[in-house]
Image (cartoon, rainbow, N blue to C red):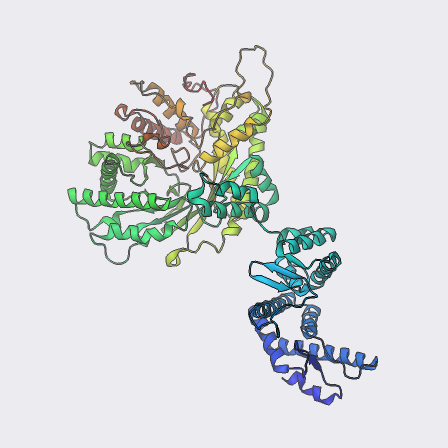
Amino acid sequence: MAGFDSDSTHSLPILVQQRNGQMAPLDHLRLAEDLQTAFDRAGYPDPMFCQEVLEVVRLSAQSRLERRHAQGEAQPFLEPGALGDLVEEALVQMGNSALAKAYILLRDGRHRARAALSALPGGGGASGQAPTHLPVVRDGSGSTPWDGARIAAALVREAELPHEIAQEVARRVERRVFNAGLRRLNSSLVRAFVDNELGAMGLEAALERQRPVGIPRHDLREWLRPGGDRQGELVQHLGGEVLRRFLLEDVLDPEAAELHQKGDLDLRDLRAPHRPLVLALPSELLIDGEATSQTPLQLLQAAAPLLAHTSHGVVIEDLEPAFSAVGRGSRATAAAVDFLFAAGAMGGASGRQIELANPGGRGGRWSAVLLAAAWQVLQAGGQPPRLWLDGHDLAAALERDPDLPPALEGLMDAGRLVGVWHGGTERHAGPGLRRRGRERGALALGGVVSINLPRLARAAGPWREERFLEAIVEKVRQGVRLLTSLDRFQAGRDEFPGHLRPRREFALSPIGLHQALRILGDGEIRADQGARILGLLAEAVVRFGREENLAVHLDGVFGTQAAARFAALDREQALAQQGRLFSDLPAPESETVESYSVGFLPPAGERGEAGDPAGSVAASVAAYLARLLVGVRAGALSDGFDRAPSSPQNPAQTAPAGPGAGQSASQGAQLALWNRFEALRTEHLEQGPPVPATASAPPLPISLFDTSG
């Protein structure tokens, strides 16, 4: 090292005391290697700067020893650790805090290694014991003698404090421990001393950064008690709870996190924030080589590893390439039945869902085959994947197989078939996902934020739509800010098998739309008013998302849990009630429900009854939905899908999830509702924007929406 050659010209050598007490000349080569290691870890490959640091350290050490010699020391030397302190000071003074931090962590790692070795038999001198005059700190890896340098290094690493301030905190903590006369303490007590000093010094930001995320022991004992309802999934529950607290306290914008906790907004699946909710991709991305008769099952084998990287499941689109070699007629149906049985079993075993969207095929061929096969699987007690089909797919399937209507009705009633629509350049690609134009890559739904519309409507009051819309805009802005924080957290963490790099999207879900409309309309629901609200929501969420460079759109999925949570929180509040001239007039703003409506559909009890053979109520619901959703470019007639759908053998497993749920399949009400909705929606789009609420549109029957649901 050229920077140290001049050391021989000085009459005073640089001596360093070793940890065994012996003196040795400064090891130039070892110091240079240590610095180079720290530089490599910090990603700073600059050998010239390393030489400069070495020269500064040499001059500082020489100056210190000469001062001591002038004060009367015959043979001054550097104490153990002093040389490392000089290196840290040099790096900080030369303006490179990143390298200083890397060197501090390198020293701390070596200290931990020495402490571990000293705990072995014979590792701590003749007796292998720690010095008796120092307190002993016990942690998860064993017991080590007190060392204030470890506290300083931890504060630099965890709390991101400057080295000088970290050393001052460590000195204060050491003084308190020694003054208290403690001989043995655990790492939790040391951390409490550190937290106390950080608070006393006004370092609240550092205190928050290094504060542990934990679970109260009382809660843990409750979850571990015999017969606890979480015994089967305890590890998953505990890990999810830690992630939830970390996300709310450390990741999300503080204002947005408070809105989530208060119940103005709700972020879906806080217990797995590092994973997207849904992954959607065309089947061609999972097919390796030419298609054969075994390709459908190989497709599932390729999709299986992806399930563990999502919270909800995987959507497979465009199945025609995978089924192109299975044949026709009964062979195609048999292959589809095997495929659907296997997909349902795989989803049930993993706790996630495999779903199918836009199956493709010329003339609706595969739509017809998959629908007939799904009905066979459902009748046999299986759980086929949920199918997302648009009006063209359903019409083509019915034209190819006129015997399909009972199957379609049964699948809709079980929540296994969902009608979707597309608009403009957007295509619905599964729950919460939209494809752009001819996009063929993978998509990921990073998260969904739900907005509490009834609370905003109560704050605005009946007949105050403008005030309500102003409040919506602000809440959408805050919801997008919350999703932006989630997006930054997920960036770089969504590593999928096969080097898959999906485009990440997010969604905003309106909760309690129909309760909010009843409040704003003073007991009456107006489709045109709802269309204006949804139109504003759809426009605002896209606009604010673009400002944050985030793909966000309006959707009605993943809101069931938020709907129940919002309703429960609102029941605890004192609900305002506007005075009535006549006491028998309804006051919907003061009504409470067990759960708000989810998405765009009315509550299940207001969609028509099985005893409506003429279909007048279902037709009114279809007309209402067509006017309501004229401003939503792409979407699905769904009500959340937070739960697993039911089967004919176990209808009580969950509430049906399709439009008109609860009706008898023999009535054909759901299919009729969907067909009528498609026709009316197309008609409204051709006519232009929705007409004002005062126009002569046919009124909805008051019996349809005369309850709060």
247 is higher (above) or lower (below) than 563:
below
Question: Residue at the spot x=30%, y=53% of the render?
Answer: 301
Image quadrant in which you'd find residue 385: top left
The relative height of residue 241 versus residue 175 in the rendered view (above or below) is above
Vertical side of 17 occupied by 299: above or below = above
Query: Residue at the location (73% across, 77% down)?
Result: 60
Work out which quarter of the rendered image holds the N terminus and state it. bottom right
Residue 361 visible to the viewer: yes
In the displayed orientation, state which residue is furthest to the front.
127
Query: Is 384 left or right of 542, judged from the image as shown?
Result: left
* Circle count: 0
**Which percent across, then down, holds residue 376?**
22, 37
Q: Nearer the viewer, residue 199 or 311?
A: 199
- Residue 108 in the image, given as x and y percentages of width and height: 61, 67
Name the one closer to the observer, 98 or 119: 119
Q: Residue at x 44, y 42 (%)?
A: 231
Is residue 544 visible to the viewer in this orientation of the structure?
no
101, 45: nearer the viewer: 101
Q: Is residue 655 above or below residue 614?
A: below
Q: Quadrant of the C terminus?
A: top left
- The residue at the far right in this view is 71
Residue 128 lies, in percent from the top left, at: 60, 71
Residue 14 image offset from top left, x and y in percent:
71, 82
